[in-house]
Image (spheres, rainbow, N blue to C red):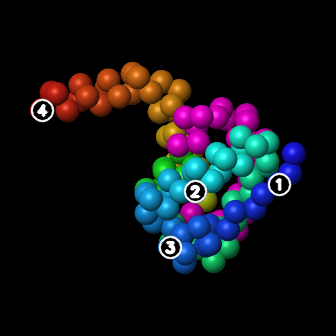
Amino acid sequence: MGQKTISIFDVVGGKAAVSTEDGERLFETISAFLEKDFDVVLDFANIETLITTFLNAAIGQLYSKYDSPFLRKHLRVRGLQPEDRDRMIKTIERAKEYFKDKENTEKDIREAFDDE
């Protein structure tokens, strides 16, 4: 088992990690390395703008395939700006909740919109 460092700056082609498409691409890259038994380090150096849309697609979606203990062991983050740390934590917490009981969460959402 090796380690692979992924530069978010290189993935998004600049200082802004904002698009769902870039997040999806990062998700696919992370998943490919995890499936090959690599530990993955996400390097956020030089990222000045980071939004939830990107994090949901890139990080949150990982919880649909992997459980928390696995990701804690095999996925690391470095270079994250202090102000983005809370955004990352909230994304992870929401993803874990959602994927823990996806069917009921989606049912609750549908019912909420049906009431209108």
Instruction: Give whichever of discs 4 and 1 has the lower sequence position.
Output: 1
Q: Nearer the viewer, mark 4 or mark 3?
A: 3
Q: CA distance from mark 4 to mark 3?
A: 37 Å
Tell me which amino acid carries mark 1. Answer: Gln
Q: Position of residue 29 (x, y in %)?
A: 63, 53
User: Which residue is disc 4 drawn over?
Assistant: 116
Q: Is residue 64 magenta?
A: yes
User: Which residue is disc 3 drawn over?
Assistant: 16
Q: Position of residue 7 (x, y in %)?
A: 67, 68
Q: Nearer the viewer, mark 1 or mark 3?
A: 1
Q: Which mark is residue 3?
A: 1
Tell me which amino acid carries mark 4. Answer: Glu
**What secondary structure is marked by label 2?**
helix
Q: CA distance from mark 1 to mark 2?
A: 16 Å
Q: CA distance from mark 1 to mark 3?
A: 25 Å
Q: Residues within 10 Å of mark 2 (few under 14, many from 20)?
A: many
Which image quarter is the C terminus in?
top left
**What secondary structure is marked by label 1?**
strand
Q: Is residue 103 above or below residue 15?
A: above
User: Which residue is disc 2 drawn over?
Assistant: 26
Q: Do labels 3 and 2 touch, CB within 8 Å?
A: no
Instruction: Give whichever of discs 3 and 2 has the lower sequence position.
Output: 3
